[in-house]
Image (cartoon, helix red, strand yellow):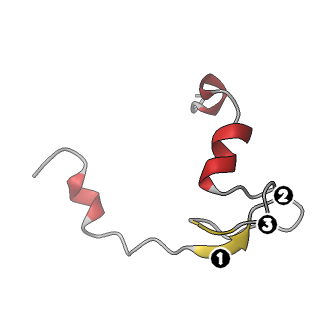
Amino acid sequence: MAYGDRNMRNRPPREFFKTTCTACGKECEVPFKPTEGKPVYCKECYAIHAPPREDRRRRF
């Protein structure tokens, strides 16, 4: 068993939600329930609009 595999077996399959990309209008699926008023991006647009990598790190 590889490191990290232990918890994956007990986890239910991830639920995806259909939505429309805020930037390009393309229909896409995201692994979270979209919140009204917050932008949602498809994979391609997220790469453009995502915050710089260092800003996405967890801070303790």
Residue highlighted by disc 1: 18
Q: Name the disc covering residue 54, or none.
A: none
Q: How many other residues sit within 10 Å of disc 2, few (<14), some (14-19) or many (≥20)?
A: few
**SS class, disc 3:** loop
Q: How many other residues sit within 10 Å of disc 3, few (<14), some (14-19) or many (≥20)?
A: few
**SS class, disc 2:** loop
Q: Residue at x 62, y 33 (%)?
A: 56
Amino acid type, mark 3: Thr
Residue highlighted by disc 3: 35
Where residue 15 appears, x then y in whole percent? 51, 75
Rounded to the nearest angstrom, the CA distance separating label 3 from label 2 is 6 Å
Instruction: Please tell me whether residue 58 is drawn above or below residue 14 in the rendered image.
Output: above
Rounded to the nearest angstrom, the CA distance separating label 2 from label 1 is 15 Å
Q: Nearer the viewer, mark 1 or mark 3?
A: 1
State left or right for residue 20 relative to residue 17. right
Amino acid type, mark 1: Lys
Whether tag 3 and tag 2 are in contact, CB under 8 A, the answer is: yes
Amino acid type, mark 2: Lys
Whether tag 2 and tag 1 are in contact, CB under 8 A, the answer is: no
Q: Residue at x 62, y 66 (%)?
A: 32
Where residue 1 appears, x then y in whole percent? 9, 52
Q: How many other residues sit within 10 Å of disc 1, few (<14), some (14-19) or many (≥20)?
A: few
Q: Name the disc covering residue 38, or none.
A: 2
Where residue 9 appears, x then y in whole percent? 24, 67
- Quadrant location, the C terminus: top right
Q: Nearer the viewer, mark 2 or mark 1?
A: 1
Q: Quadrant of residue 53?
A: top right
Where residue 16 appears, x then y in whole percent? 55, 73
Q: Residue at x 61, y 23 (%)?
A: 54
Q: Earlier in the sequence, mark 2 or mark 1?
A: 1
